[in-house]
Image: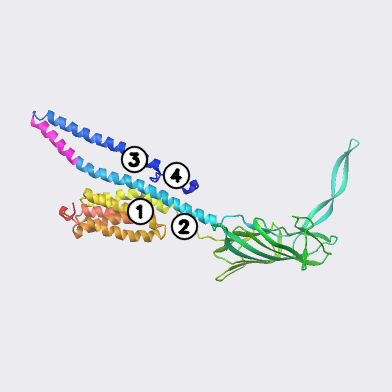
Amino acid sequence: MSSSTQGVPGLPDLTHPTELIQFGTEVLKASLLLVFLIVALGVAIALMSFAFRRHQPEPVMFIGEWAVRYSQLLRGLQHLTLVLVLLVVGFFLCSTLSNRYHHWEQTKVAQVVQSVAGDKLEQIAPQVRYVTQEPTTYTTQVNGKIVKVNDTQQVNRFLPLAGSQIQVKLDQNTDVRGRSAVYRVDYGADYKFVNRLKDINNFFFEAPPPNGYSLLSNYKIERDRTRLEPTNPGDYGFPFRLQPGEETTFRVTYQAQGGPRWIYNTADQLLSNFRLTAIANFAPVDFASGIVPNEIKTDRRSTQFTWIFNDNVSVKNPFGVFTNTNPIQNTGIIPRLLLLAPAIFLWWILLLYLSLPMSLKNVAIAGSIFFACLLTLTYLARFMNAELAWTMISLVLLILTWGLGSTRSASLAAIICTIAGAVLPVLGLLVPFSGLTLSGAGLLSAVWLAVRHWYGWYGLQLEDFKK
């Protein structure tokens, strides 16, 4: 497994044994320190109470007030400890899930990339070459003197094709492992050449096979329906004679197999009477480069791309066809949500504390339900739309939250806190308009607290709630 698919670097993952042991060690140290501080404070108050119990009543009353405050502190510390425990455990749970989900996303991306990976099949446009004698001048030394010599040299020149009629049929299969796509190409092209030179009649038709193939069969060059044979093995330059003013046609055919992309490279030639038809018998498929085809025909089984240039044209980018994969969208949304989930949980619990008299049992149950909902969302988002999954989970969360109150008014208060503190913030991190949704959730939270405490609406009595 590559490092890119192992998770978010530096993020704790409790599925790793070393990180789990390190986390347990740190929690044990922090717990011992907290217990020591609480015990030390209690012992100090007890010693001071014992020392002043026979003295004047003022110090005794002062110590008594400290004892009462210490008792209240212990009760409040229980809630604080429970919230901290839920927050820390929830953070490591969410970080682990974030790592897992990031790994799933990267694995999915790697599978899509691998399905269309491979060398492209590139067909280079053929050329017509001829050799001509051109004058040249160079200097040499004769008997100690510099002499200028006029001579001739052979130079390779090229002539443009007068017409190109190309048709290629593409079929897509998978490789032996069944992971990557493989193209099977049936290529046929007719090239027209006119000798517009007056004193040259010897030419070479150079038609190399495609680049990047894994299998090439039935490669054949014909001139006026007569097959041409190469003079040297591996040399795809075919000599022919053509008198000035005459024309001839060449036909190139072959079957090839290669990577999931086929292109036709003109090699910066000036094209004349050019027509290229690529028929792809698979889907999804799209044309390569920025040269839009003149015609695109699609039926149930195939897609046909046609490029037509009746006059002359020069192109820099090659023509071609490639397998089009569906874009992988919304990556990184769930991992971001999971990393921010402890903050959302703290927001929600704070709203509940400011609105309802929460007991330790209710806090523990509420925290467990919240993180269980996130766990369910993480796995459901792999198979269905995340917004739809959270909508269904939110209904379950709201139904369970109704049980925080023993009366209808108390349950409505819990529902409002859950919508403002949990449902909307999570939804805001899933939808594109995150800022607007989170702003709405924050405004709803502030309005609810103002209505609850300043204006006396929903004035709930303590006995209306479960202890």
Labels 1 and 3: the sequence-earlier one: 3
Mark 1 or 4: in front is 1
Please, what secondary structure does the residue beneath circle 2 have? loop
Using the image, tell me which numbered label, if any, was put on residue 375: 1
Q: Are marks 4 and 2 in contact (CB under 8 Å)?
A: no
Q: Position of residue 122 (x, y in %)?
A: 65, 57
Q: Is residue 81 above or below residue 174?
A: above
In the displayed structure image, the side of residue 49 where residue 92 appears, left or right: right
**In front: label 2 or label 3:** 3
Residue that lies at the very extreme toward the front in this rendered image: 176
Q: Which residue is mark 2?
A: 329
Q: Are marks 1 and 4 in contact (CB under 8 Å)?
A: no
Magenta segment includes 139: no
Callout 1–callout 3 Cβ contact below 8 Å: no
Q: Residues within 10 Å of mark 2 (few under 14, many from 20)?
A: few
Local crowd size for mark 4, using a 10 Å CA cut-off: few (<14), some (14–19), many (≥20)? few
Q: Mark 1 packing: few (<14 Cα in 10 Å), some, or many (20+)? A: some
The kind of residue on which mark 4 rests is: Pro
- The amino acid type of the residue labelled 2 equals Gln
Q: Which mark is residue 9?
A: 4
Q: Earlier in the sequence, mark 2 or mark 1?
A: 2
The residue furthest bottom is 299
The earlier-in-sequence mark between 4 and 2 is 4
Does residue 314 appear anywhere in the picture?
no
Q: Which residue is mark 3?
A: 24
Q: From the viewer's perspective, is 159 left or right of 177?
A: right
State the predominant SS element of the stretch in magenta.
helix
Q: CA distance from mark 1 to mark 4?
A: 21 Å
Tell which of 111 and 55 is nearer to you: 111
